Image (spheres, rainbow, N blue to C red):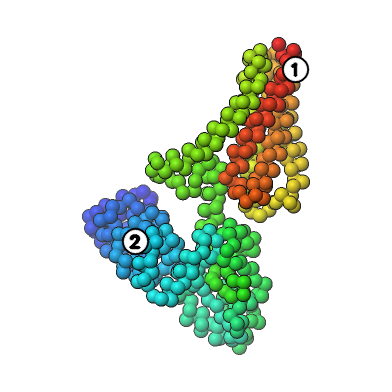
Amino acid sequence: MLEERQEELINSVLEDDKEKIHEIIDNMYPIDIAIIIEELDDESLMKFNEHIDNELMAEIIEQASEELQVRIIKLFEFKSIVHLFSYMSNDDIADILGNLPIKMRKDLLKLMKTGDTRQLQELLGYDEDSAGGIMTTEYIALRGDLLIGESLKKIKEIGPKTEVIETIFVLNNNKELIGTADLRDILVAPEDEKLLNIMNDNIISVYPEEDQEKVSLLVSKYDLKAIPVINHKNSLLGIITVDDIIDVIVEEQTEDILMMGGVSKEERVDSSLGTSIKRRLPWLFINLGTAFLAAFTVGLFEDVIAQVVALAAAMPIVAGMGGNAGTQTLSVVIRSIALGEVSLKKNWRLVFKEVGLGIINGAATGVVTGIILYMKYNNPYLGLIIFAAMIGNLVIAGFFGFIIPLLLKVFGVDPALASAIFLTTATDVFGFFLFLGLAKMFLPYLL
């Protein structure tokens, strides 16, 4: 369906058919329109902008990819961009400005209102992956001593200019955050009741320097619609809304998956050849180094392999099963770390569970592998050796799959970034050493 509309919209823009353009986009979401217009050339993009109203164009820019946002800002007049910004929330504007060259950012800020500029510069001062970097300064905050009737008037007045209206933040006379009130509770409360009497004073809040991933865990844990960002004087700086939290969760999960594969989060399918080489090649060299380490281990037993060729066929089974088992443990542990469910200090004893799991799974797969090798090579000792090696390597895989990401977390290294490399090295090197070492010990029974 989207593909059909894409072709229709592009053709309508090329033909400069305003009526057809509106007919197509009237029932479309801004994000879908943004995806489609990425295919337009600069001239067609300008034509498209001429045929739609500024409010819709602002929504499209908000939802567009970083590349399209920068392209539009470079293409349009700065006065037009500033006018489009008037339809956006400050946190979205700050995100867009953060992707621009410094000179262009300064030129745009000079054209904006002083109050907006001050707020935007404050938002731009925070790290983009912190609570301050993803918060918005558009919220409703009222004094606790206001009556419900007065509060409703304020909400009606301020509401259209804010991003969230369901949660009202309550302040004292010193402008300190003292609670939150749900709009539903305000609507059903008596008009002569004070706001502080119906508020919830059990506040979940974060400081602006808090990492966005930890913020997302808090929002998920306590089912919050918005979470306030405060300074160390308990003054309200901004709020983080659930739609931004969803973006954070998607971004963090995508980053972890890509890092586990040794790929940068900045890389895309359509990235240039040079960019892809730059992002991937260093990790491939690191993997090459670990591969040589495994090869060196195998080289220590060349004489044994030369005498029993069947060992060469069985070696990849031991290493492969160890790698797969380790990856299973690694995936579970990294996810638990991301959710804040596990730490080395509190949960180190769980490593024994992974060791036990390695013994059971190793024995189960080792029996099957041993029987198959016995039937193929008619040597029961080969079957017993691979049975023992399978148990040993799966124990190693479980142990290192659990310990490595937790140790990396302690040393401040992202577990998703480097765990897989260390794990593969451990299972390959120890797996080969164990299997071939046992083979050397029982060599007379294998000949």
Can the viewer see residue 99?
A: yes
Can the viewer see residue 318?
A: no
* Amino acid on which the number 1 mark rests in the picture: Phe
The residue most toward the bottom is: 192
Question: Of callouts 1 and 2, which one flags the residue occurring earlier in the amino acid sequence?
Answer: 2
Q: With respect to residue 164, does 146 lie above or below?
A: below
Q: With respect to residue 333, does 290 lie above or below?
A: above
* Amino acid on which the number 2 mark rests in the picture: Ile
In depth, the one of 83 and 372 nearer the eye is 83
Q: Which image quadrant for residue 205? A: bottom right
The quarter in which the C terminus is drawn is top right
- Residue at 66 percent across and 20 percent down: it is 301
Q: CA distance from mark 1 to mark 2?
A: 72 Å
- Residue at 56 percent across and 86 percent down: it is 149
Q: Position of residue 107 (x, y in %)?
A: 35, 67
Query: Few, some or many C-alpha atoms within 10 Å of disc 2 (few <14, some 14-19, many ≥20)?
Result: some
In depth, the one of 310 and 266 nearer the eye is 266
Q: What label sits on residue 46 in the rendered view?
A: none
Query: Few, some or many C-alpha atoms within 10 Å of disc 1 (few <14, some 14-19, many ≥20)?
Result: some
Q: Secondary structure at mark 1?
A: loop
Q: Is residue 356 left or right of residue 281?
A: right
Name the residue beneath numbered marker 2.
Answer: 73
Q: With respect to residue 198, does 305 lie above or below?
A: above
Q: Is residue 143 left or right of residue 280?
A: right
Q: Position of residue 364 (x, y in %)?
A: 72, 30
The residue most toward the top is: 447
Q: Position of residue 95 (x, y in %)?
A: 45, 62
Name the residue beneath numbered marker 1.
Answer: 442
Q: Which image quadrant for residue 92? A: bottom left
- Residue at 38 percent across and 59 percent down: it is 101
Cβ–Cβ under 8 Å for marks 1 and 2: no
- Residue at 62 percent across and 38 percent down: it is 422
